[in-house]
Image: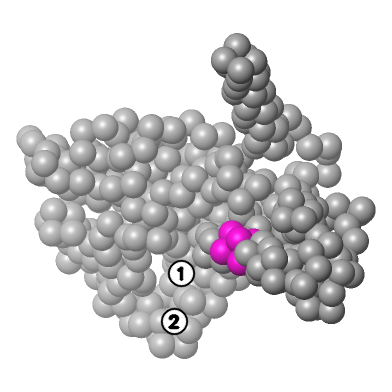
């Protein structure tokens, strides 16, 4: 059996320096260790209390309840409990509007009306009106939608100057829009984000689970039902073993969990190393912070020496270096843009109907509007003919 991890590397250093051999055993229930109402401990903490093992490498969140059953080493890290969820990229129903910020769209509408009013005003004030108002509107609209048959009005120098600058500006806007839209259609996805425990309990896309024998399970028994943690504990189902052992289930969107940030970063790094994609998302808002340490039998004779070794490794930066080596791709999914970008290669296939549904919806509304307008015209013609 092969082992990897921060505490495993610490164990090897301790065994090498103190020159002892060890036998590695695992709890039958696969739990870290929590106590029930009768005072009975399970998991590795139970094994320590029953003196079945000398110490456990964990690492274990340092809470008062556990300090009764063991003696902790000096902390090896300060970590945070955060939600880890599957990456779900949904289709963006507003992809046609995404190329421009809403303020740009408002400015474009204002500019569109301003140009029509300006050109119409110039046309009206001309000594000889050679351009109709409807012709001005047609010119502005055609240039705005990049119609190839647009010609600059040449009835006057003033009209030509305004028309030329409008045509030039419209060309830049149209090509900016089309280029950005093409890029957005290539990856038409918006991530579903769970940033905190509150977000996790409020969403309905997937359930969540809690590690049996973990700090969260121990604390959940005392959680106030009216709090966010109370809601999380009430809706959580048990998950065996560690967060890392549940990574496949989380990636498959079966459920989410609350885990230590270091464990989540390790899960994400390993997943990216295998697939080149970000399959997990780590929330940005931590539920709580905990110091993590190794657990020993009370009054262990080797604990002072172990503490000295751990302190030396911390001061020399060896634990941080080990973490970085175990997570070579730990920063590849650190931002939302990186998460979305890692899924860009999925778009090598042709665009599906769901990718362009917004375009078809826009065309459908246009057809309905045209039919409605046609009905109005026929109604007007019928009424006009009957009363004339």
Residue pointed to by mark 2: 313
Binning the other alpha carbons within 10 Å of mark 1 as few (below 14), some (14 to 19) or many (20 upward) gives many
Q: Is the stretch drawn in magenta largely helix, strand or loop?
A: helix
- Asked if the magenta segment contains residue 113, the reply would be yes
**351 falls in the magenta region:** no
Give the mark nearer the N terminus: 2 vs 1. Answer: 1
The 10 Å Cα crowd at callout 2, few under 14, some 14 to 19, many 20 or more, is some
Tell me where residue 380 appears, x and y as whole percent. 60, 22
Where does residue 44 sit, x and y in percent of width and height? 30, 47
Task: Using the rendered view, name the quadrant where residue 221 is placed.
Answer: top left
| Magenta stretch bounds | 109-114
Does residue 312 lie above or below 177 as drawn? below
Q: Gap between marks 2 and 1, in whole Å? A: 9 Å
Residue 306 at x, y percent in the picture: 34, 74
Q: Residue furthest bottom?
A: 316
Left or right for 111, reference 43: right
Q: How many marks?
A: 2
Out of 280 and 216, give the one closest to the viewer: 280
Would residue 59 be seen by someone viewing this image from the given angle? no
Label pair 2/1, CB-CB below 8 angstroms: yes
Say what secondary structure mark 2 lies in.
helix
Q: Say whether residue 227 is left or right of residue 185.
A: left
Q: Is 100 in front, or is 191?
A: 100
Query: In percent of the image, x 25 and y 40: which residue is there?
Result: 232
Question: What residue do we see at 17% from left, 41% from top?
Answer: 230
Q: Please state the horizontal and vertical placement of residue 40, each as a whole percent of the image.
A: 14, 38
- In the rendered structure, the answer to whether residue 199 lies left or right of residue 346 reads left
Residue at x 65% of width, y 19% of height: 381
**Residue 170, visible in the rendered structure:** yes
Mark 1 sits on what residue?
10
To which quarter of the image does residue 222 belong? top left
Q: Nearer the viewer, residue 72 or 99?
A: 99
């Amino acid at each position: 059996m092969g082992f990897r991890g921060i505490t495993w590397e610490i164990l090897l250093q301790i065994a090498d320096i103190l020159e002892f051999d060890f036998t590695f055993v695992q709890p039958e229930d696969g739990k870290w260790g929590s106590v029930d109402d009768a005072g009975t401990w399970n998991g590795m903490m139970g094994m320590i209390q029953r003196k079945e093992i000398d110490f456990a490498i964990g690492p274990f969140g340092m809470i008062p309840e556990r300090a009764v059953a063991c003696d902790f080493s000096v902390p090896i890290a300060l970590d945070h409990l955060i939600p880890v969820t599957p990456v779900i990229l949904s289709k963006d129903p507003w992809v046609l509007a995404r190329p421009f910020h809403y303020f740009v769209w408002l400015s474009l509408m204002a500019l569109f009306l301003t140009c029509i009013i300006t050109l119409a005003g110039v046309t009206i004030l001309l000594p000889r009106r050679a351009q109709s108002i409807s012709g001005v509107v047609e010119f502005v609209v055609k240039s705005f939608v990049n119609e190839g048959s647009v010609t600059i009005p040449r009835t006057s120098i003033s009209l030509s100057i305004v028309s030329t600058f409008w045509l030039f500006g419209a060309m830049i806007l149209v090509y900016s829009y089309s280029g950005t839209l093409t890029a957005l259609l290539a990856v038409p996805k918006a991530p579903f984000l769970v940033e905190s425990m509150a977000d996790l309990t409020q969403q309905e896309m997937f359930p969540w689970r809690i590690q049996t024998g973990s700090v969260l399970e121990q604390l959940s028994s005392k959680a106030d039902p009216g709090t966010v943690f109370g809601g999380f504990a009430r809706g959580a189902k048990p998950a065996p073993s560690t967060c890392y052992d549940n990574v496949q289930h989380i990636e498959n969107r079966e459920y989410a969990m609350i885990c230590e940030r270091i464990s989540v970063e390790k899960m994400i790094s390993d997943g990216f190393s295998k697939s080149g994609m970000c399959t997990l998302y780590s929330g940005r808002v931590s539920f709580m912070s905990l110091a993590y340490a190794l657990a020993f039998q009370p009054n262990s004779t080797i604990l002072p020496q172990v503490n000295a070794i751990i302190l030396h490794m911390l001061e020399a930066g060896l634990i941080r270096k080990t973490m970085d080596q175990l997570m070579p791709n730990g920063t590849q999914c650190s931002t939302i843009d990186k998460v979305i970008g890692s899924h860009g290669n999925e778009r090598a296939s042709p665009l599906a109907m769901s990718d362009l549904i917004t375009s078809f919806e826009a065309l459908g509304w246009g057809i309905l509007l045209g039919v409605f307008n046609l009905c109005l015209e026929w109604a007007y013609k019928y009424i006009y003919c009957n009363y004339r």
